[in-house]
Amino acid sequence: MIRTLFTSVAALGLAAAPAFADTFVIRGETVWTGTAQGTIENGVVVIEDDRIVTVGGADTEVPGGATEISAKWVTPGLIASFARTGLVEVGAEDSTNDTAAAMSPFSAALNAADGFNPDATAIDVTRIEGFTRLVVVPNTGNALFAGQGFVADTSGDLDTELDEKAFTFIKLGEAGASLAGGSRQSAMALLRAALDDARSYPARYITQNDGAVLNRIDAQALSSAARGQQLILIEASRASDLNAVMDLAEEEPSLKIVIVGADEAWRVAPRLAEMNIPVIINAFSNLPGSFEKLAATSENAARLAAAGVTFAIANVGDSSHQARLATQLAGNAVANGLSFDDALAALTSAPADMFGLTGYGRLAPGAPADVVGWDGDPLEVVSAPIAVIIAGEQQSLESRQTRLRDRYLSLEESERPRAYTRP
């Protein structure tokens, strides 16, 4: 079992409990389950070891000697469905930035998990905002193919268990066009040729050193995705680009595809729903920030939900240090017509289903014990977690920022740094 730091009893306002306790009873005035149980008023969640064993009402029988936590709201642990958290410490400092490798001779073969740093400052910051899982996506360097992404928890433990090579990431649209010779048609031709190379691995490479567009190592890495055995995450925003991805999916129905960005997805929502292609969106994208986002609207999420499209909400624009702001984006989506349940599902059960995280994103007996207790509505900007449990273990609610805050709040006036004054 992964070992993590425990937040102090004083900080959490919890009853004292032995350090070895593996059983928690979490009582919430509102318990959002993400299941057919719906939302339970005055609910109870019981955790033993790394699993949820019971979810019920106030009269639920609870084991003796368990650590009890009381919260206003209780939800599953949130999932950051598009993040680069842990791959970069300081974006402008190349030595701490492992998101992309523009000078590498490889692309699809790059394994982002090799660059993951559980000690990254942003890990703690993300965890204390209620996110227990990260879908970590590499960035492209000099090719359409960014490499292999992974899923990690936010415990910050050096022995964090990673679901490596969970998907491969590819860019189309404006960015893909610039990486593939200057046009969208060149990007699509390159993608089709690469999939053909990967499907023919290793046979084609026995007689030739390279394929049409991929070297041996990249073809091997892409082969599972090309055969429908691995998820493909494709970035695209314009409605016509989304149609091009769906055309590809119709030509090659074995491919498993999730689209990220999808700013104009509402325009092709019926087709996305019919083809059962999920999308990951920034629900607050509502300005024509580029020519491929001219039809962006803050009602994108609500319109996708109405059409029956599966979608997750993520802070796609600042995914390394501010993945945590996805709750604010979801709250804004609610203000623009999305139901609360759909918004919270877009942070929990929807991304869990997209990335094959069986049991995550829900409060149900037998599910992995990623659970968060909140001091208020989780989609309100003023709310915050009072307890975060990952795989049945209570986590620290400290970060570098909270330690700096506490340090300077407690300083006497004479100990504080001198403020600048004009001479």
Image: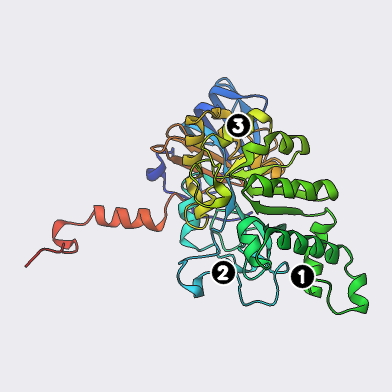
Q: Which mark is residue 303?
A: 3
Residue denoted by label 2: 98
Q: Residues within 10 Å of mark 1 (few under 14, many from 20)?
A: many
> The N terminus is located in which quarter?
bottom right
Closer to the eye: label 3 or 1? 3
How far apart in space, not on screen, are marks 2 and 3 (Cα)?
A: 36 Å
Residue nearer the viewer, 306 or 183: 183
Q: What amino acid is at disc 2?
A: Asp
Q: CA distance from mark 2 to mark 1?
A: 19 Å
Sequence order check, earlier mark of 2 and 1? 2
Would you say the residues marked 2 and 3 are in contact, meaning their CB atoms lie under 8 Å apart?
no
First in sequence: mark 3 vs mark 1? 1
Q: Which amino acid, by three-letter code, is at mark 1?
A: Asp
- Mark 2: few/some/many CA within 10 Å (<14, 14-19, 20+): many
Q: Is residue 179 above or below residue 359?
A: below
Q: Is residue 411 left or right of residue 322?
A: left
Residue 199: assigned label:
none
The kind of residue tagged 3 is: Arg
In the rendering, which numbered label is found on residue 218? 1
Q: Position of residue 89 (x, y in %)?
A: 48, 65
Q: Relative to the observer, which residue lies in front, 356 or 37?
A: 356
Residue 102, image quadrant:
bottom right
Tell me the mark number nearer the camera, choosing from 2 and 1.
1
Dot 3: element: helix
- Circle 1 — which element? helix
Q: Nearer the viewer, residue 113 or 268?
A: 268
Residue 237 position, x and y percent, is 61, 49
